Image: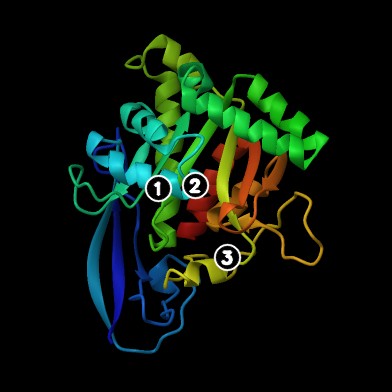
Amino acid sequence: GAQVFLVLVANMGGKRKREKTEKGKLARPAPDQDEPESDAEDSDGLDWEANNDDESDDLQVDFEYFEPQEVDYHSVRSFLVKIFGEGPPVPSEIADSVVAQKVVGTTIKTEGVESEDCLGFMTVFSPGLVGDTTWMKDCCSVLRAAAAKHSDESAQALGRVLDSGKTGWIFTERLINVPGNVVPSLYECVRKDLVYATTSKEVFANERVAFQFDHMLFWVTAVRDRDAAVKKEGVPSGEPTKKKAKKDKSKADSSAPPLVPLYFEQDHFLSKAEFSFSYGEGRGSRLVFALKKAKFDAAVGELLALRLE
């Protein structure tokens, strides 16, 4: 069949004081197609993975970024189930907090703010605001147990960032076929949310303090073969072919490939991490890592520069 190209127009929608991002073009195949070929010039200079010579049509798609809404609950819960199963932590409890937190958090949609079809989300939680919730206590228990099982070094490193009380917990997930060059703007939205949360007088004083982080913690799905994992979904990973996957810093069976994040952009943050460890196998494989807040901010800027170069 004819190959379909998505002409990306990323719009910050209802987010506070957002600026429009650059336009781009990226291939999105149907599930039964091979990976398509994308013009490097049309994809913002990135050599996005592709190989299909069929005729193509242009399809205009607007990707917009919004604050989480109540209508996003079911989509967000489904995304969290992909990470945590049915828990603990319990995805429905985290989803309640995601849609309730308006100061920090962003969703991706194509049909307006009231649409129930959320294509992805990202938020950051402060233990100073949600530390007493059952789900956050469960998160801490699960990670501390996994770190202790991995190594004493991992347990100590994780303990330092959790015990500080100044670590932002990043929760993010999306549909696997969200175009890769839409993703940097999602991180930039959240980075700007954190600036707003810590500086705006419209934010309560206790929240301004709570969102002042020293570290950012990632807890992400991991795979041993990213290409194989995304091809099971019938779509390309969105990873620029010039970008190499960062190897997991954790111990690994020498006969098996190292675990890497499912999503290519998380390699960039992992490369700047103070520590990382992995746990689980198969669909239950997870990577946990933390980096300084300043390095997180710099990495977001680098992702945007990579997208636009």
With respect to residue 85, does 8 lie above or below? Answer: below
Q: Which residue is mark 3?
A: 226
Quadrant of the drawing holding the N terminus: bottom left
Q: Which is closer to the viewer, label 3 or label 1?
A: 1
Give percent across and percent down for residue 96: 34, 30
Mark 1 and mark 2 in contact? Answer it, CB < 8 Å. yes
- Does residue 240 show up? no
Which residue appears at 61% of the width and 52% of the height?
Answer: 285
Which residue appears at 31% of the width and 46% of the height?
Answer: 75
Q: Is residue 190 left or right of residue 261?
A: left
Q: Which residue is mark 1?
A: 79
Give percent across and percent down for residue 301: 52, 45
- Color encoding of the figure: rainbow
Q: Which residue is mark 2?
A: 83
Give the Cα distance between marks 3 and 2.
16 Å
How many marks do you count on the picture?
A: 3
- SS at circle 2: helix
Label 3 or label 2, whichever comes before in sequence order: 2
- SS at circle 1: helix
